[in-house]
């Protein structure tokens, strides 16, 4: 698929999995909407394709210090259709043919890490974490015939991921916070093709003292 | 007032000892300091008693030359006229020097004073310089009254200070006794972990409760993450039935504030600690309490509603 660069760039500035910034002893539960660009490789393809990624996330954090929180978040995303050109594939055991492949991907990941917080009302943030990701790759379509090439059926790939993110939150009072952030996630595939995503997003969170 | 009346009152006031150094009659010791003394002599003349340290020169000065007839040495006392100054110096030749008396008269006879020299019982009572000055009867009377008032009020002040010291000591003893009894009855600390905050980023961290006897002290911190000082005016601890149980509030690490009704001020970005007494906490055990702090006028309210259960 062609790179929707303009749309992806607009989404990227909105921030990805944004975490609210709790004070010490304070917990936060939040939700975020994300958008960005994912670069997805494919077996047999010489070049990876860049596709838009749109998703939602939820997170839970706990402030161990005013400046430091531990955070876990989960996020799912739906990626646009990736297109890989000049692929040599065979269909139903037939002779190899050259042509383009298209394929869609959905991801779900869980990440835990540390969140640095640099403010009170306006809170610059930086997050670094690691986790796992599942990638559901749909059956690929061969452009010339519309069939699914051999070896390109529905499949699940598992990755280890590392995520870095920076953002800015605005605390609205005792309870609520809104924020925006941008981040990047790099996958370390466990047998699957390479994968990276740059995301931006907006978030809304609520605080409470759990103890 | 007629002069004879003043003189009579001055005599009635009596001698005016000042630090036991220059005791006077008919004259007045105006002031003493560092072994110095000033004696005011009324027109009718006066007396003075001067204590000295043995073998120490003591200078007696006058505003005009003395009559030479007055300067006479004895075995125990060496008395010399000062040729270049208006005065004499005296010296006791031994610690056993017997008291002696000098009649000192200035040439114009404005000052006539009978001085008794004696060896000081304590070094602190000894003088090294005594100034004699002529005064009017009114001045001498006024000085005598002031000196006597000062002497009497000094004793009263000392008495009051002694009473205060005794009361403070007694209070401290009773306080120690009360604390000791409470410790024997119950001395326990329970960690608490309750927190809450205001919209203005003022956070209360309830840390612990200390049980001492039938009372307890709730200890919490006020963390001020706002940009303005937090002026703590009121601390409330309420039981579920709404009854108020907060007693004396003590603060630490807080700035002072002159305003009335303010317990303490937590500066912007600072953290202050507070202990609030809870009386007879047996009634409060196992019941959820609510802690509330406010600034003057009810502003800056922070309420901790969860996690405050004493056991």
Image (cartoon, rainbow, N blue to C red):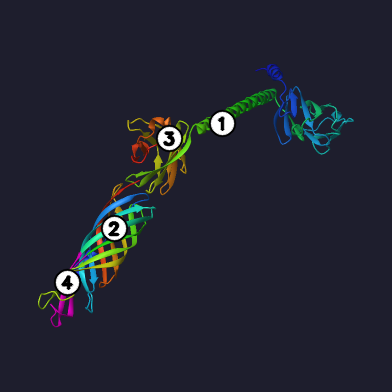
**Label 2 neighbourhood size at 10 Å, few (<14), some (14-19), many (20+)?**
many
**Label 3 neighbourhood size at 10 Å, few (<14), some (14-19), many (20+)?**
few
Q: Calculate the distance from the C-alpha at mark 1 to the C-alpha at mark 2.
A: 58 Å
Query: Circle 4 sits in a helix, a strand or a loop, which is it?
Result: loop
Dots 3, 2 in contact, CB < 8 A: no
**In the displayed structure image, the side of residue B14 where residue A174 appears, left or right:** left
Q: Which mark is residue A153?
A: 4
**Mark closest to the chain's N terminus, 2 or 4:** 2
Q: List x then y, in percent, for residue B223.
A: 40, 46
The single residue placed furthest to the right in the displayed view is B75
Q: Calculate the distance from the C-alpha at mark 2 to the C-alpha at mark 4.
A: 30 Å
The single residue placed furthest to the front in the displayed view is A93
The residue that label 2 is drawn on is A73
Q: List x then y, in percent, for residue A140.
A: 16, 73
Query: Circle 1 sits in a helix, a strand or a loop, which is it?
Result: helix
Query: Circle 3 sits in a helix, a strand or a loop, which is it?
Result: loop
Q: Is residue B33 within the magenta segment?
A: no
Asked whether the residues under marks 3 and 4 belong to the same chain, the reply is no
At 26% from the left and 67% from the top, the residue drawn is: A158
Dots 3, 4 in contact, CB < 8 A: no
Q: In terms of secondary structure, what is the magenta stretch mainly?
A: strand
Q: Is residue A99 within the magenta segment?
A: yes
Asked whether the residues under marks 1 and 2 belong to the same chain, the reply is no
**In the displayed structure image, the side of residue B302 where residue B22 appears, left or right:** right
**In the displayed structure image, the side of residue B148 where residue B84 appears, left or right:** right
Q: Calculate the distance from the C-alpha at mark 3 to the C-alpha at mark 4.
A: 79 Å
Q: Calculate the distance from the C-alpha at mark 1 to the C-alpha at mark 3.
A: 28 Å
Camera-side mark, 1 or 3: 1
The residue that label 1 is drawn on is B172
Q: Which residues are magenta?
A: A78-106
The residue that label 3 is drawn on is B260
């Amino acid at each position: 698929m062609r790179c929707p660069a303009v749309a992806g760039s607009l989404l990227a500035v909105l921030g990805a999995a944004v975490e609210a910034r709790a004070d010490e002893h304070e917990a936060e539960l939040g939700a975020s909407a994300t958008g960005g660009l994912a670069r997805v490789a494919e077996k047999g393809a010489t070049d990876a394709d860049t596709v838009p990624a749109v998703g939602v996330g939820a997170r839970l954090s706990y402030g161990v210090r005013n400046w430091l929180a531990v955070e876990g978040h989960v996020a799912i995303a739906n990626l646009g259709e990736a297109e890989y050109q000049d692929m040599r594939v065979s269909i139903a055991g037939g002779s190899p043919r050259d042509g383009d492949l298209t394929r869609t991907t959905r991801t779900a990941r869980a990440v835990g890490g540390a969140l640095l917080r640099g403010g009170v009302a306006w809170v610059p943030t930086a997050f670094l974490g690691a986790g796992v990701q599942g990638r559901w790759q749909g059956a690929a379509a061969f452009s010339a015939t519309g069939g699914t090439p051999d070896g390109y059926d529905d499949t699940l790939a598992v990755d280890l991921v590392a995520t870095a993110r920076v953002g800015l939150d605005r605390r609205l009072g005792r309870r609520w916070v809104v924020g925006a952030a941008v981040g990047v996630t790099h996958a370390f595939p466990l047998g699957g093709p390479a994968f990276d995503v740059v995301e931006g997003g907006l978030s809304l969170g609520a605080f409470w003292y759990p103890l | 007032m007629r002069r004879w009346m003043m003189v009579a009152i001055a005599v009635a006031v009596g001698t005016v000892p000042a630090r036991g150094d220059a005791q006077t009659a008919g004259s007045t010791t105006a002031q003493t300091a560092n072994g110095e003394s000033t004696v005011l002599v009324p027109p009718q003349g006066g007396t003075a008693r001067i204590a000295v340290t043995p073998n120490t020169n003591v200078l007696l000065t006058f505003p005009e030359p003395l009559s030479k007839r007055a300067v006479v040495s004895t075995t125990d006392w060496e008395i010399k006229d000062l040729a270049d100054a208006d005065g004499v110096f005296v010296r006791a030749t031994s610690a056993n020097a017997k008291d002696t008396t000098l009649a000192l008269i200035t040439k114009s006879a404005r000052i006539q004073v009978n001085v008794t020299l004696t060896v000081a019982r304590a070094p602190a009572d000894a003088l090294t310089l005594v100034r004699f000055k002529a005064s009017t009867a009114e001045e001498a009377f006024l000085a005598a009254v002031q000196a006597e008032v000062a002497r009497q009020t000094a004793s009263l002040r000392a008495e009051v200070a002694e009473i205060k010291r005794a009361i403070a000591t007694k209070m401290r003893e009773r306080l120690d006794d009360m604390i000791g009894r409470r410790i024997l009855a119950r001395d326990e600390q329970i960690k608490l972990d309750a927190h809450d905050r205001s919209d203005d980023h003022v956070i209360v961290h309830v840390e612990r409760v200390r049980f001492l006897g039938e009372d307890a002290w709730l200890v919490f911190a006020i963390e001020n993450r706002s940009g303005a000082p937090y002026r703590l005016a009121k601390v409330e601890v309420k039981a579920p039935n709404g009854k108020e149980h907060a007693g004396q509030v003590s603060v630490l690490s807080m700035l002072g504030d002159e305003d009335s009704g303010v317990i303490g001020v937590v500066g912007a970005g600072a953290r202050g600690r507070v202990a609030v007494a809870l009386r007879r906490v047996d009634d409060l055990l196992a019941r959820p309490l609510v802690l509330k702090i406010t600034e003057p006028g009810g502003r800056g309210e922070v309420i901790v509603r969860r996690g405050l259960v004493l056991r």
